[in-house]
Image (cartoon, rainbow, N blue to C red):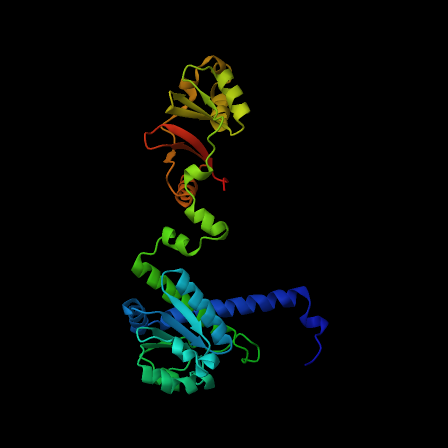
Amino acid sequence: MSAPTSSNTDTDALIASAQRTLSTQAQALANLASQVTDEFAKAVRMILDSKGRTIICGMGKSGLIGKKIAATLASTGTPSFFLHPGEAFHGDLGMIQAEDTLILISYSGETEELMRLLPSLQSFGNPSIALVGNMDSTLAKHCDCVLDISVDRETCPNNLAPTTSTTMTTAMGDALAVALMECRAFQPQDFARFHPGGSLGRKLLTRVKDIMHKQDLPVCSSNSNLKDAITVMTQGRKGVVLVQEQDTLLGIFTDGDLRRAMLKDSDGMMNKSIADLMTVNPKTINENVMIVEAEEQMLRDKITLLVVLNDDRKVSGILEIYDR
């Protein structure tokens, strides 16, 4: 291996290398989309019709990608696991049940470890899907469904290291997972069931009432004057005053409303009641809504705060967009 030279390690050269790699990968993905045929729909239906698991098998880099595909499928509603072909040849074939569907990954379609397994797999009679770069390969000829992941060349400058081909394999696995999710109408709450840990799980399982502010809410009555409302807003430190009567929301007055009122009528505004200045019918949300839906609403409406109501339409709290 030759030593690096200053000409190929300077900043411009390294940036150009990354740009070439990413552009090549992007073009290959665009080409892969045009390679999708009825075989893809057949593969999805095979997995949907299966009463067992989807078992992914591949060697080397294909095996590493296979583990990722198995994990993605399992976490999105398709029971799946990865089977190492070497271990399978030494007893782990017993993990395969009659109702399982197989996905066999080999870019060349001639990987030795998979070739050694083929006779046994065919004798089992499980439905099989091949992900290959050679549609005339042995693996392609002996599987029930074949998905073409071929590329013109690897991004590797020597056209040797699996680079572009592994990206295509990952992308095809993702395409299968997404199509299966859509067929099953897989929802965020379903995703949460399989991801209970960490911030993602908490976010998907959390309701508005679990994190909303419900103590010492900044509240004033409709006959309060602006000075009193500003005092309440300042003490509440949320940039808003809730105008309500007996827990029934009449409107809100925000620091944005204050600035707009001052620009419009700075001299006479101090004599007005808050009822004259408040925003009626503000955006609200029910306390039992999932936090992901609340965030989507705030982003869609371009607001940072929602008034939270209970099932009786009474004020129960305030939710801010950065609450977690």
Q: Position of residue 205 (x, y in %)?
A: 42, 47
Q: Is residue 303 left or right of residue 127?
A: right
Q: Quadrant of residue 43?
A: bottom left
Tell me: residue 250, above or below residue 7: above
Q: Position of residue 178 (x, y in %)?
A: 37, 62
Q: Position of residue 213 (x, y in %)?
A: 47, 33
Q: Position of residue 165 (x, y in %)?
A: 47, 75
Tell me: residue 99, above or below residue 201: below
Instruction: Specify the quadrant that holds the N terminus.
Output: bottom right
Residue in the foreground of this view, choosing between 281 and 272: 281
At x 71%, y 74%, the residue is: 5
Tell me: residue 50, above or below residue 227: below
Residue 136 in view: no
**Furthest-top residue in this view:** 271
Tell me: residue 110, above or below residue 318: below
At x 43%, y 18%, the residue is: 274
At x 45%, y 72%, the residue is: 66
At x 41%, y 82%, the residue is: 134
Q: Quadrant of residue 143?
A: bottom left
The number of numbered badges drawn on the structure is: 0
Residue 74 in view: yes
